[in-house]
Image (spheres, rainbow, N blue to C red):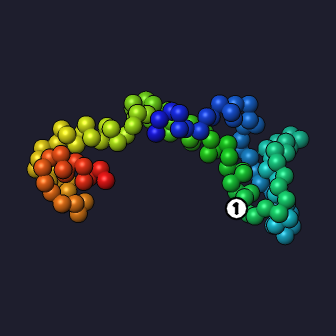
Amino acid sequence: MSKDKRINLTQFDGMTEGPWTKDLDDEGKRWIDAYVEGEGDKNIARITNGSREDAEAIAKLPDLIAELKKCYDFIESRGLDEDIEHKMVIDLRECSIELLDELCFQAGVETGTKEEMIARLLE
């Protein structure tokens, strides 16, 4: 995935740090609070008519953003932020005809010339 197609994580700079906790009303369906526990609990959001799943998603937001940042950092550190399909073509062109034949067999793709097999494997 190229950088221009990623979610811009800088928009979340300054967001209240987690962990966030969820709280449902007595019946678990009329309102949901997401808050940071501690001295003078800080309420982050209140959603009316939400579900338990909504509450879970909201409470996990800081963790999800942190994990996405780790993924982006990993992608960049490995030089994988370019078009991955382009990298696959380069790697497949370096394969022997025997290996391409085996890859086609494993993928259930018809064999042929080296270029034909690469094209079929990338479809």
* 107 horizontally vs 19: left or right: left
Q: Amino acid at mark 1?
A: Glu
Residue 99 in view here: no
Which residue: 13% across, 54% down? 112
Image coordinates of residue 117 in percent, x first then y, are 19, 51
Q: What is the count of numbered marks? A: 1
Q: Is residue 122 above or below residue 3?
A: below
Tag 1 residue:
53
- Of residue 56 and residue 36, the one placed in the foreground of this image is 56
Q: Is residue 95 above or below residue 33?
A: above
Label 1: how many Cα within 10 Å (few below 14, some 14–19, many 20+): few
Q: Is residue 111 above or below residue 78?
A: below
Which residue: 43% across, 29% down? 77
Q: Quadrant of residue 91?
A: top left
Looking at the rendered structure, the secondary structure element under dot 1 is helix
Q: Residue lying at the far left in this picture: please name it.
A: 98
Residue 110 in view here: yes
Which residue: 31% across, 53% down? 123
Q: Residue lying at the far bottom in this picture: please name it.
A: 27
Image coordinates of residue 60 in percent, x first then y, are 67, 49
- Of residue 114 and residue 81, the one placed in the foreground of this image is 114
Image coordinates of residue 97 in percent, x first then y, are 11, 47
* 72 horizontally vs 51: left or right: left
* 41 horizontally vs 54: left or right: right
Image coordinates of residue 95 in percent, x first then y, are 17, 42
Q: Residue lying at the far right in this picture: please name it.
A: 40
Which residue: 50% across, 39% down? 71
